[in-house]
Structure formats: structure tokens, C-alpha cells
Image: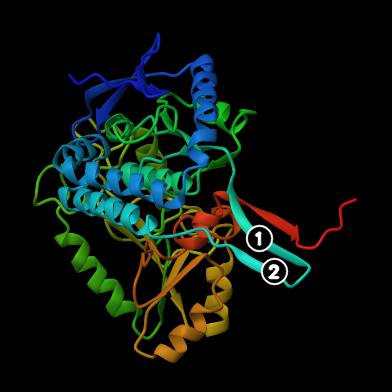
Amino acid sequence: MTEYTHIINGKPAISPTTLSVQNPATQKKIGEVPVATKDQLDEAVAAARAAFPAWSVKSQDERAQVLEQIADIVEKNIGEYKTILVSEQGKTLANAEWELGGAVLFLRETAKLRLPEKVIVDNEQTRITEHHVPIGVCAGIVPWNFPLLIAILKIGAPLLAGNTLVLKPSPFTPLATLRLVKDIQAVVPPGVINILSGDDSLGPWITSHPGIDKNNGQACIAAKRLYVHEKIYDQFRDEMAKFAKTVKIGDGADPQSQLGPVQNLMQYKKLLSFVDDAKANGYKFITGGDVNPNPSNGLFMPVSFIDNPPEDSKIVREEPFGPIVPLLKWSDEADVIKRANDTKLGLAASVWGKDLEAAERIAKQLQAGMIAVNGIGMSTPHSAFGGHKESGIGVEGGLNGLCGYSNIQTFALKKQVAFA
């Protein structure tokens, strides 16, 4: 079994205790990772802070070249990363390939960005400019849904902006990220990128650490509610039922699989609570709903659609983060916009329809950080990825994401000064 370690100041490090990692498709152990101590977090932050002065004074072009080298490493090892990713996360081979391809794309496109300098005043007496300077030590906390892609988002922009980094992968999916950071030590100076694996204690330690200047996390953009006009609701519902029955569910390592397992038992039980609540309240399952409460051969859950549950139901009000989705009828445009916006979340939304003018009119009234018309997940390396409300503060991606890892500094130069 491969040995996985922290990386602190460019060197591998172990801990007194370890954490087992399971394949969600088999529920079998596939690896062990060290559980970081508070002292090791202090060491990682100290290493990042020590590396900051030399890294921050490098030019943007020099730092961009390192991002290109990291992209080369991902491309070179894409086969091995894919195997690890499928086994620990459960996603299909096709989805793993998409994630890794996206990681390379984001690195290469981020490397093309440059922090701007703005001239505010420039006359005979004074020149005042605004430019961006690095923040310092950044911490990246990576979730289990896109372990490598989101790790790359946490690496690319902060490094290009001149910061150093302490990275924490999810305890459910740490393997591929630990391997990635180990590999890229070949192209970054010691201490620039540190990584610690750990249990649920590590995240709060990181977010409260006085030596870390910026923390960030991430969420997902899967649709959680589908509002369908009453004129086409029945037809749409029936077509979705047919589609759900064609989805092949299985081990992500099987090339025929279209939907892998739920990533971990904690999330599986959370999804089970949505199923139980729907059944207890008498809601109708269009498809799915047959879930094993005590799985032993993989954390698999069928595609489940619920037929027009009440607006105040658990499945509508809360985020399941899994393949269980309510279909909801609407007839009045103003009413459906109000219903769609009546949530504490606001990461992404989409509007679908042949009437593009109407679709755009509705889309512009939705309260979310990312809106798409006749499409979903239209995030690119050039655009901001982030939410409104409780879906997050700040953005990843694009120039706005890059600027978020910097501080604005106003620089004033008086050109004519009479010295005694």
C-alpha cells in the first residue's frame, strides 16, 4: 500500500496517528494518511511564512512559469491521478478525466492572467497608482467532491499573486491531493506549498490560526430543485423517469458506469434522511427512493425524483448534495422567481426555454453568483466562480479571483519636491 505523508517545507512528514481512507464503491480500505497535530500546523505555517519574502518578489511572469510546470506535471501523471481519484472519490472514469483536464486548463489559463496596475493621477506634480500586492500565507481547504480540481484552484491563483500556501484535503479524499503536492515540490521552492492531512479538528485549527492571512473553501453547483411550467410538467416528469431508469450505477472504475457511489457514509446517511422524510410525509417518488439503510457493498443510491413536494418540505428547503431532486410546478413568472430566490443559498442557477428573451428576463432576477441560460455549470478559467448569500464570500477564477488573493496598495509619488 502506498505511503502518504504531509509535505512541510518541501519534505515529507508523518504523524503519531493515521486515518484510513475507503473506496466508497467497495467500502474497503485503500490507504492511510497521517493526522496532523497542532505543532505540525505551526511548522507548516512557519515554513510558508519563511518562504513568502523570496516568492513574493518574483515577477508575475516567473510565477506564471511555475504554474505551467505544475500543469505539465498533472498531464504527465494523469493516468495515475485518475486511478487514485476514482478509487477514493467514487466518480466515474469519464468524470475523473474531465476533472483532471479541467485542472490543467485552469492552471494554463490562470498563468496568462496578470494583476493590473491602475494609474489614478499622473500630472507634472504627482503620480498616483493602485497596484496589487500579495496577502501572505493563504490556507486552502479542499472538499471531497472535486479533490484535485479544487486543489488546483487553491494553488494557481494564490501562487500567481505571490502568496504561499497551506493546503488541507478532505479526510474522505486526501490521497490524490497529497500525491499531487508531493510531485510538484520538484518545481516550487520549499515552503511555498505545504499540505497537511487530518481529521475534523484540522479545519478549525487552520481557520483560527493567527499566522494565516486568508482562508477559503468551496461548494458545488449541482441542481437541487427543478421548477417546471405546469403546461409541460407531466411530460417532463415522465421523460425524467425514463431517463433515470437508463442511468447505469456502479463502481467508478467500470467504464460503463454513469453514476458512482455516494462519496462517504456520513453523506449517505444525510441523503437517507431526505428519503425517510419524503416517505414519512407521503411525497411521491417518481423514480428511486429505494435505499438500503445499512449498505455493505458500496454506497450506491438510485437517481430519485420527488413529484411536486410542498415548498416548505425538507427536500426543497435544504441541500441534499446527492442524486435526489424535487420537481416543482409553476404557472406565474413572478411567483416562481420568488420561490426560486426563497433560499439561504445562492451559488448557481439556470433557466431553460425556447423563448430566449423570457429566459434571460427571468435569469437576471435570480439571486445567485452564477447564472446560465440553456446550460449548467458554465464556469471557465476566465470567469468568476462564487456564490451569493450563504454560498460563500469572494470568488475563484478569472481576474476577480486572482485579485482576491491580493491587497490593493495605493502608491503616490510627488515629482517636484523642494528639499532644503
Report the quarter where the N terminus lies: top left
Q: Is residue 65 left or right of residue 418?
A: left
- Tell me the quarter of the picture where residue 131 sits: bottom right
Determine whether 119 is above or below 351 in the image: above
Q: Secondary structure at mark 2?
A: strand
Which residue: 9% across, 49% down? 255
Mark 1 surroundings: few (<14), some (14-19) or many (≥20) residues within 10 A = some
- 390, 83: nearer the viewer: 83
Give the amino acid at mark 1.
Answer: Glu
59 or 212, nearer to the observer: 59
**Is label 1 in contact with label 2 (beta carbons under 8 Å)?**
yes
- Residue 23's tag is none
Residue labelled with disc 1: 130
Is residue 287 in view from this perspective? Answer: yes
C-alpha gap between disc 1 and disc 2? 7 Å
Eyeballing the image, is 363 above or below 184?
below
State left or right for residue 353 relative to residue 121.
left
